[in-house]
Image (cartoon, rainbow, N blue to C red):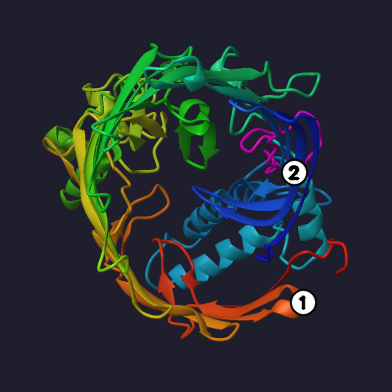
Amino acid sequence: MNPEIDNLKFDGSLHYRINEKAELSYSYRVGKLDGVFQRGNKIKLDNVVVQNHALELKGENYIIRTYVSLENTGNSYNVKPLADNMDLYSGGATDTKTPASWGTKFKTALQTYGSSNGGLNNTNLAAATAYARAQADASRVKPGTPEFEALKNTIIKLNNWDIKSSAIPDAPVTGGAALWQKSRMYHAEAQWDLSSKIKIFNLLAGADARIYEIIPDGNNFVDFSRPISERNLALKDGSFGKNIYYKKFGAFAQITKTLLDEKLKLFGSIRYDYNPEFDPKFTPRLAAVYSLKQKHHFRMTYQLGFRFPALFEALSYVNNGRVKRVGSLSYINEGLGYLENSYTQTSVVAFNAAVSAQGNTDAAALANRSLLVWANLPKARPEKINSFEIGYKSILLDNKLVVDLDAYTNIYDGFLGQVQVFVPKGETIGSDAAVLAMLDRNRDATAATANTAASKGQDRYRVYTNAKNKYRNFGTALGLTWNFYKKYKLAGNVSYNKMKAITTNDIFVTGFNTPAWSGNLSFGNSQVVKNIGFNLVWKWQDSFLWESPLVTGQIKAYHTLDAQVSFRIPSWNALIKTGGANVFNKRYLQYAGGPTLGAIYYVAITVDGLLKRGN
């Protein structure tokens, strides 16, 4: 794949002043992207287009806004099924186009060589390997050839990643790699300030609605009303079933009241949210700000919040090779069994290590069955948070020093994330057959021997689910800004953030992915001499553990220096900025599995007032 990225964006808007107090506006945004996206699989983005239409009516004390977002992934494709399906190709001028993987051909040829040469041993293994390689490669397309490119272009135009496309019966592949996403999002919201109608306190009210229209593609999203065996298959009309709608509606009211000669300001709000997949939720919020002598400001906030699973967390149904990534809604589980009939991946790994050390027999497997942990995943529910924050802000030393300090603690109940589990095919957790199905061996229902029973193997799922434990997240931050001499300014901040399980650890991976300590320090002057200014920013963060489905690893601590110089040209109404981020090009990683990052250098020119009369 070509890793280059290009991104083209355009936006425009039309505003109409209805009267002195109301304005109607329409805006349009469109973006086109070619590039690479990495998550569980690597995706080649080719001619991806996202459009946004927005209509807004804004008055003196109200605002009504609606918009729709339209997505089309164009000619994009998934590299993993592309590689898998090219490997399954065994075509040629005289071949019957029956799928057979390179690995299967290699294994068959290796066994054939052994049968003809008195078995495989140390003396002939190299020759046997070369023979098997040659046989397996005989009908395989070679990179750089027209046949390779033709096959690739065939596969990336077919949609089903794991099933032969019905659109091209003679296609010499078992599946395709095309990424088809053409879903839509509709959103509407309104807000009305009723303070002028009520004299006792200020009142703000509002409501919003959001609807996702998901067009099933057979790979990322499917029509769950169809039988499991048919969810990935295209219908005669080319669709993959009925469109799916994921909805959320909400409304809120907020009261604000000042007391004690406006030294104390109180806030109170209540919000109602409803998602048809879950029970309705009420979320209150209370806040207070107290100002002492107009210099010392103390604040306190408490709120209860809920987060419904996002679209992909709720409804995904993605086949990532041997692992299928599935959403959190419980009806997706029907007929699959990953909620109630699965073992955790970590326990299966430990189980296989123990069995392998004891000879990899069925007897060893049954003797170590206690290592397998029943996942027993909960039915999905919204993530819940109780949050409490206190803060202090002041301007001291004759308005030259600004101090901002805060501390917070959050308690998460039902934290949403991912867990990987193994489901024994056709067996029930706890049975001998289910235990044997967890063995990491190439076995099937016909592979029974004197030491190994027949096994149907397992299905593997990465499930969006709620943590069984409660988690506490807490931290603090201090920010200082000191205007110590003329326009010279020194500023800095430091923050501490941590997350811990309140009870014992469970099978859940939080993916908190935040360093415990981080901070920055800046020094600058907007006008060190006439029309010339500068700014320096030193950034630092501590090492931390990055957790994700793709990779988990320790990220080293790093620090960088950003610098900028600005030149103002008053006669042109222009400002020129030149500088760089990480100017010393000290390469670092931001996340595990990601690229190393270096410096960015830039020059920016801004000219204002080009259309003013007389310019």
Q: Is residue 251 above or below residue 404?
A: above
Q: Is residue 126 above or below residue 270?
A: below
Amino acid type at mark 1: Trp
Q: Is residue 329 above or below residue 470?
A: above
Which stretch did the figure color magenta? 160-183
Q: Residues within 10 Å of mark 1 (few under 14, many from 20)?
A: few
Task: Give me the residue at 63% from left, 65% from top.
Answer: 134
The image position of residue 362, as x and y in percent, is 22, 36
Tell me which corner region of the image, top left, top right, bottom left or bottom right, holds residue 289: top left
Secondary structure of the residue carrying numbered label 2: strand
In what quadrant of the picture does the N terminus appear?
bottom right
Tell me which corner region of the image, top left, top right, bottom left or bottom right, holds residue 437: top left
In what quadrant of the picture does the C terminus appear?
bottom right
Decide which of tag 1 and tag 2 comes sooner along the chain: 2
The image position of residue 121, as x and y in percent, is 38, 66
Amino acid type at mark 2: Arg
Q: Name the residue carrying label 2.
A: 29
Task: Give me the residue at 23% from left, 21% from top.
Answer: 431
Residue lying farthest to the right in this orientation: 614
Q: Name the residue carrying label 1.
A: 572
Q: Is residue 599 visible?
A: no
Query: Does the segment drawn in magenta span residue 303?
Result: no
Taking depth in this image into account, of 19 and 218 the one nearest to the observer is 19
Q: Is residue 177 above or below residue 577?
A: above
- In the image, is 422 to the left or to the right of 81? left
Front: mark 1 or 2: 1
Taking depth in this image into account, of 548 and 322 the one nearest to the observer is 548
The image position of residue 495, as x and y in percent, is 26, 59
Q: Residues within 10 Å of mark 2 (few under 14, many from 20)?
A: some
Tell me the CA gap for discs 1 and 2. Answer: 30 Å
Taking depth in this image into account, of 6 and 189 the one nearest to the observer is 189
Task: Give me the residue at 81% from left, 36% from top.
Answer: 170
